[in-house]
Image (cartoon, grey):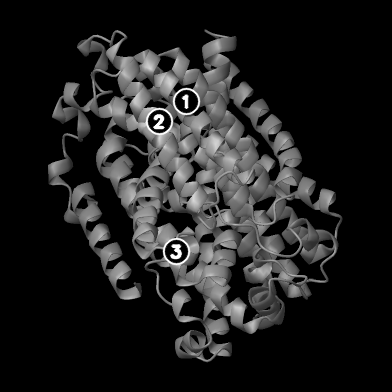
Amino acid sequence: MLLFAPPTSGPGPAVLAAASPLRLDAAPVDYALVAIYFVFVLGIGLMARRRVSSSIDFFLSGRSLPAWVTGLAFISANLGAVEIMGMSANGAQYGMPTMHYFWIGAIPAMLFLGVVMMPFYYGSKVRSVPEFMRRRFGTGAHLVNALSFALAQVLIAGVNLYLLGTIVNVLLGWPMWVSVIVAAVIVLSYITLGGLSAAIYNEVLQFFVIVAALLPLTLVGLHRVGGMRGLTDKISTEQLHSWPGNQLSGFSSNLLSVIGIVLGLGFVLSFGYWTTNFVEVQRALATHSISAARRTPIIGAFPKMLIPFLVIVPGMIAAVLIPQITELKTTGTGEATYNQALLYLMKEVLPNGLLGVAIAGLLAAFMAGMAANVSAFNTVFSFDLWEQYVVKGKPDGYYVTVGRLATVGATVIAIGTAFIAGSFSNMMDYLQTLFSFFNAPLFATFILGMFWKRMTATAGWVGLVAGTLSAIVVFVLNKAEVIHLSGQGVSFVAAGTAFAVDIALSVIVSLFTAPKPAEELVGLVYSETPRDQFVDPDEAALPWYQRPALLAGIALAGVAVLNIVVG
C-alpha cells in the first residue's frame, strides 16, 4: 500500500539522471550478473508463449496456477518502484513509523481480500474487477471504473518505468530518454510474448532476486553503523517507534495521529487499494480453485510482514551513514533527495558482485511493478472496454491480438507518463494523488454493494463519480492553501472524504431508484449467495496449512505481535 508523502527538499528525481554526480561503480562481474538476469526474464517470456492458446491463457494464465506461485507474484507485483525506492526514502525521512504502510496499511486488507472478497471474484468467474462492477451495477459504474483504472495503470507504469530508466542511466550513463525506452522494450517483450503467465513467473523470479539484493544491503549496512544498537543511537526517539507517528501523519495530536493512521490508512486507503485493485486481484484469479484464490493474498501476507526490514531499515541506515542524506535530513538542503537513499547506500557499502545482484534486484522490482500494471491494463482494455463497448462478438483469438496491441500501446504511453512522474520530487506524491482519487470511492461502492442488496445501479456510478470529485476538491484546496495539511494528513482526509461522500450519496440515490431483482444478485451480494458457492467442495479435507481462514488468523496474530514489539 502506497500513500502520499510531502515533497522533499532539494532537486527532484529528474536530477538523479541529469545533474547528480551519483554513479554506481559497476565492474564487469556486475554487468554480467545483470545480463544473466535479463536472459532469464526473456526466456520465461518465450516459454510462457507456448502455453497461450486462448484469451483466458493470455489474460488469466488459464486459471491453472498454484497458490504459492500466485501468492509470491501477488507480493512481487506490489514490489515496484515506489515500494522499494519510496519506502526506503520514507524510512530515511520518517524512520519506524513507515512500518505502518505494511502492518496497518496492507496486511489486514490483504487478509480481508482472501477471506471475504475473493470468493465473490473467483466464484462469479469474472475476468476482471471492472467486470464484477458491471454485473453488480451495470454499464454506468463499469465504464467509470474501467476508464479510471486503465488511466491509472499507464500513469503508475510510468513511475516504475522512470525509475527503471534511472537505474540504467546511473549504471551505464546513457541519456535518460534512451534508458527509459530500452527498459520499456524489455518489459514489453516478455508481456507481449507470454501474457499474464510470463508476468507471474517473472514476478516469482523477481521476488527472490529482490530479496537476494536487499538482504545483503541491509546486513552490510547495519554492520557499517554498528548494528541495531549503533543505528538506534544515531536516530531521534520519535523515529524509533512506529506509534503515534505524528511526523508521518502530519497531525500534532497523538490521538488524531493514531485515528488518522488506523482509519485513514488502515481502513479506507488500505482496503480501497488491496481489495479492489485488479493488478493484485488478477494474480488470485489465475489460480485453479476458489481455495487457492483465497490463499493467494494470505500467503503473500507472510513475506509482506518482513519486507519492511529490507526496505525501510536501509533507508534509516542511509540517513546516518550517507553524508548527502544526513545533510538533507538535518538542513533540508543539498544535492541529494530521499528518493536516492537506496542508491547512495548501494554505492557506499556493496562490493562488486553484490553490487551487481543489488542492481539486478532494483531492475527486477521496477520491471515487476511495470509488468503488473501493463498486464492488468491489457486485460481491462481488451475485455472491459474494447469487447464491451467497441467490437463485440469476435473470435477469441481476435481479443488476444487486441491484448497484445494494448500492451504495446500501454508501454508507449508509459514512456510519456514516465517523464510526468519525473517532475515530482517524491514519487509518493504522484502515486497517492492517483490512489486518493480512485481507490477510496471504489472501495466504498464495492463494500456497500456487496453487503447491501438494496443498492442500485444508478447509485453505483453516482457514488463513484462524486467520491472521486470530492477527493480532488480536498487535494486542490490543500494545494491552494485553503486548508493546511502536512505529511500524510491530506491523503487521510481526502480518502475519508471520498469514502463518506460515496457512501452517503449511494444510500440516498438507492432509496429513490429501483434495485435489481434478488435473483440477479446471486454471487454478487453476500446475503443472496448460498454459502456453498464461497468454498470448494473439498476444502474441509485440506491440510491445515491450506485452509484460508486458519492461515489468515495466524497472519493476523503475527502482524499484531510486530505492531506491539516495534510500537
Bin the neighbour count of mark 2 within 10 Å (Cα to Cα): few under 14, some 14-19, many 20 and up.
many
Report how many numbered discs are placed on residues in the image: 3
On the image, the x and y values in percent for residue 443 come to: 39, 35
* CA distance for labels 2 and 3: 26 Å
The front one of 271 and 30 is: 271
Q: Are marks 3 and 1 in contact (CB under 8 Å)?
A: no
Amino acid type indicated by mark 1:
Ala
Task: Write the residue at 73% across / 67% down.
Answer: 32
Q: Residue at x 32, y 40 (%)?
A: 293
Give percent across and percent down for residue 83.
54, 57
Give the spatial CA distance, label 1 vs label 2: 7 Å
Q: How busy is the neighbourhood of tag 3: few (under 14 within 10 Å), some, or many (20 plus)? A: few
Q: Nearer the viewer, mark 3 or mark 1?
A: 3
In this view, 377 is above or below 44? above
Taking 79 as reference, is 22 left or right? right
> What whole-number distance in Å separates the C-alpha atoms at marks 3 and 1?
30 Å
Give residue 217's quadrant in the image.
bottom right
Residue 388, image x, y percentages:
51, 13
Q: Which label's residue is closer to the chain start, 3 or 1?
A: 3
Q: Is residue 277 above or below residue 379?
A: below
Helix or strand or loop: what does disc 1 sit on? helix
Query: What type is the residue that disc 2 sits on?
Result: Val
Tag 2 secondary structure = helix
Residue nearer the viewer, 154 or 396: 154
Q: Amino acid at mark 3?
A: Ser
Q: Which residue is mark 1?
A: 466
Disc 2 designates what residue? 501
**Few, some or many residues within 10 Å of mark 1 (<14, 14–19, 20+):** some
State the residue at coordinates (48%, 42%).
Answer: 494
